[in-house]
Amino acid sequence: MYKLLAILALVIPFSVHAQTTQEKGLAIAKEQDAKNSGFKDYSNDIVMTLKNAQGQETVNYLHSLTLEVPVTGEGDKSKLVFDKPIDVKGTAMLTFSHGLKPDDQWLFLPAVKRVKRLNSNNKSGPFMGSEFSYEDLSAPVVEKFTYNWLRDESCGDWQCHVVERVPAYEYSGYTRQVTWIDTKELRTVKIDYYERKGELLKTLTQSGFKLYKGKFWRAEIGKMVNHINGKSTVMASSNFQFGTGIPASEFEANSLQDSH
């Protein structure tokens, strides 16, 4: 009897399934998604500062609306509207984020007075001259990527999971992204974007996180640096308002020209 128990004690630990790095990466992504669910809607103001390689700056003022879509495999709906300067005022972009299906995006340009549906095959282009691409502005959806946990390491004052994610959807401008997600609150603090040739193209760093409604963390500063052309774009967000009941009609393509 004692001999049998001794054998079982040796065998049982090895019969338990060990989590692979891919499974761990996916689990982190799912936990992060669940932690951020339930906000319903929110709005915020944005100051977008574009800096060229010579250090010259251009500043735009925008506001953003986001509507939660609580459906597995689907992402949120979002709208960005330029408020000033006058030459871009009224420019608006609407995004419906999806999983493996191409995102739906529309752009309204006041100068041509029409709403243009963006080609799903080419979302890697710069958004309004910034270092953020149209693809970057799509809400994260777990199903968009495959994942691989690489390691845990310190990231400033925090400890972070370092997780590689590879786009599972067609027409991405990136071969892979490496994300740093803090282990305590699951905030994304950094993303390295690798272009189609495998070179590091851009890095996004996020800082100034604030907690809203006791659950939802949002970064005040998102800085995207392009390592190839030396340009950068900073999006400084403020005045977050959660759960105000933004109507679904705000997220209709045919109403983009009436955005304000």
Image (cartoon, rainbow, N blue to C red):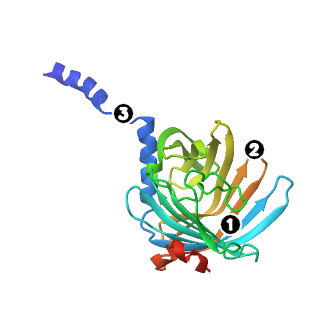
Q: Which residue is mark 1?
A: 236
Q: Is residue 15 above or below residue 61?
A: above
Please state which amino acid type lies under the numbered disc 2. Answer: Ile
> Which of marks 2 and 3 precedes in the sequence?
3
Q: Which mark is residue 18?
A: 3
Q: Are marks 3 and 2 in contact (CB under 8 Å)?
A: no
Please state which amino acid type lies under the numbered disc 1. Answer: Ala
> Which of marks 3 and 1 precedes in the sequence?
3
Q: Nearer the viewer, mark 1 or mark 3?
A: 1
> Which of marks 1 and 2 precedes in the sequence?
2
Residue 162 or residue 43, whichever sits in front: 43
Q: Quadrant of the N terminus?
A: top left
Q: Which residue is mark 2?
A: 228
Residue 231 or residue 19, whichever sits in front: 231
Q: Is residue 111 above or below residue 29?
A: below
Q: Residues within 10 Å of mark 2 (few under 14, many from 20)?
A: few
- Residue 259 in view here: no
Residue drawn at point x = 42 percent, y = 65 percent: 69
